[in-house]
Image: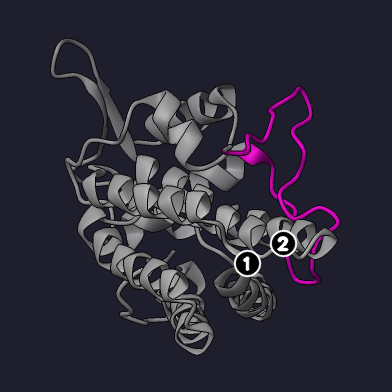
Amino acid sequence: MTRQLEDTAEPSPIGAGRMPGMERRSAIDAVRLRIGMAISLGLLKPGERLPDQEDVALGLSVSPITARRALASLAEQGVVVRRRGRAGGTFVADSPPTDVLAELSASPAESRAVNRLVDRRLLFECAVTHYAAVNATAEQLDELERLTREMAESSDWSYYHRMDEQFHRLVGTASCLDTAVEVYHETLAELYDYFIPYPIEKLHTSNRDHIALVAALRAGDVQEAVEIARKHVDILHRTMFMGLASGSTGTMPD
């Protein structure tokens, strides 16, 4: 199930109680940053329609009210525009203000901290994948395969991210590593808090790793499964916002 960060009168800061270097951002500011950076990096194009407000909330793992307030704030600043009617919705502005986009960026310290978080997930990912290759049930493998089909058929980043999270959480559960799985799920959740929207065609390319991983798990090929998982996570160093912001041109996050 997708997590939702609840918005209150005093929003819980993103990064509170987490790794050194993480900035303390309200949930609303975190959503603003993630959408703003996607626009700055050209991942969301001028005139592109964003998913519906509820889907934005689900895709970024925040509450609907947080998504609504973040989008309203971006609209007030001219980063996105809202149109009514049958063809209405929220769209990336044709010429978003460069000064506003410049403010919506991660600090170098935050980027370094997220890189360390990627390293933490990398260790856990290899461990849970190893044991999933040994312990996964036929039913779990069938469900993993179904999720790869859902991702292959998805038409926007919001739905893809939700299926992607379910996929990786199920790999963790299939490992049967008891309380260690809880720690893996916590690390996965922390990292998902920093994902930004990505073009769906790039995410579909990432899904090829998922398909190959399921095949290796079915075959019980521990070495192949772990190597697929390792490469799949290691690429985040070059494709999440901290790598992209420094000029990297990696293919995708996941």
Please indicate whether residue 165 sits to the left or right of residue 182 in the image. left
Q: Residue furthest left?
A: 87
Please indicate whether residue 223 sits to the left or right of residue 44 in the image. right
Q: Name the quarter where the N terminus is drawn.
A: top right
Where does the magenta region start and end? 2-27
Q: Which residue is mark 2?
A: 176
Residue 132 image position (x, y, % from top left): 59, 68
Q: Quadrant of residue 133?
A: bottom right
Q: Residue at x 28, y 43 (%)?
A: 156
Label disc, if present, on residue 135 of the rendered structure: 1
Query: Which type of secondary structure does the marked residue at label 1 adopt?
Result: helix
Residue 70 image position (x, y, % from top left): 51, 33
Q: Work out whether residue 199 can be spotted.
A: yes
Label 2 crowd bin: few (<14), some (14–19), many (20+), radius 10 Å: some
Q: Quadrant of residue 86?
A: top left
Q: Work out whether residue 111 can be spotted.
A: no
Q: Residue at x 67, y 72 (%)?
A: 117
Q: Is residue 238 above or below residue 208?
A: below
Q: Is residue 241 above or below residue 201?
A: below
User: CB under 8 Å between callouts 1 and 2?
Assistant: yes
The count of marks equals 2
Q: Is residue 141 above or below residue 247?
A: above
Return the residue nearer the eye: 118 or 127.
Answer: 127
Return the residue nearer the eye: 98 or 143.
Answer: 143
**Mark 1 or mark 2, earlier in chain:** 1
Find out whether residue 22 is within the magenta segment: yes
Q: Residue at x 44, y 48 (%)?
A: 143
Please indicate whether residue 57 sits to the left or right of residue 181 in the image. left
Return the residue nearer the eye: 254 or 174.
Answer: 174
Q: Looking at the picture, which amino acid does disc 1 mark?
A: Asn
Label disc, if present, on residue 174 of the rendered structure: none
